[in-house]
Amino acid sequence: MELPPGYGEKTAANTVCKLKKALYGLKQSPRVWFGRFAKVMIGLGFKQSQGDHTMFFKHCKSRGVTLLLVYVDDIIVTGDEEEEQQLLSQHLGKEFEIKTLGKLKYFLGIEVAHSKMGIFISQQKYITDLLKETGRTACKPASTPIDPNLKLGNAEGNVSKASW
């Protein structure tokens, strides 16, 4: 960073500059960005979830709902109101630099497959990648890692020993 024009080297030695804007890469910049984002969402009529503060929702007049979930710099928008989702995308595009990637395919290690029967989620790709990364692709699968009939007691009582 450089000092603004007009600050000489003599005055700069004992001068502190107050930033009026959070800069990318600073510790507080994600919090400042999310604060601004939340203010925009609330201004658009969305409510912030109390259970997960990164989720916003809006109930529509037609009894539909639009949901938005934020994770770092990824945003998922879903719901049963297509028109509301398009309006939301337009409003967010005015406030922030966004890129719409279409239907959700992969998010946080979860694959999302869309079909006429509904939405199906799987972590197969995540697990396969994890096995490759750890060099365990040749491992033999097991339907259950532990005997399903094994009876375990509480911490104070008797505990059955597994025969591994």
Image: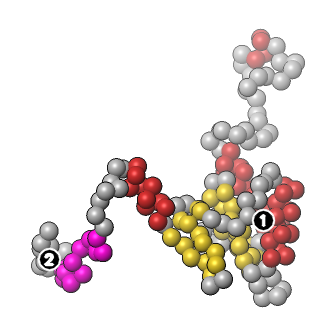
Q: Residue at x 54, y 73 (%)?
A: 121
* Image quarter of the C terminus: bottom left
Near-viewer residue (52 or 74): 74
Q: Residue at x 78, y 67 (%)?
A: 42
Q: Is residue 129 visible?
A: yes
Residue 125: x and y, percent? 49, 61
**Looking at the image, is 54 positioned above or below residue 160?**
above
Q: Is residue 69 visible?
A: no
Looking at the rendered structure, the secondary structure element under dot 1 is helix
Residue 44: x and y, percent? 83, 68
Density class for disc 1 (Cα within 10 Å; few <14, some 14-19, many ≥20) is many
Density class for disc 2 (Cα within 10 Å; few <14, some 14-19, many ≥20) is few
Residue at far bottom of view: 63
Near-viewer residue (100 or 69): 100
Please state the total of marks drawn on the protein image. Answer: 2
Name the residue that disc number 2 marks. 159
Task: Give the residues drawn in magenta, as a range.
Answer: 142-154
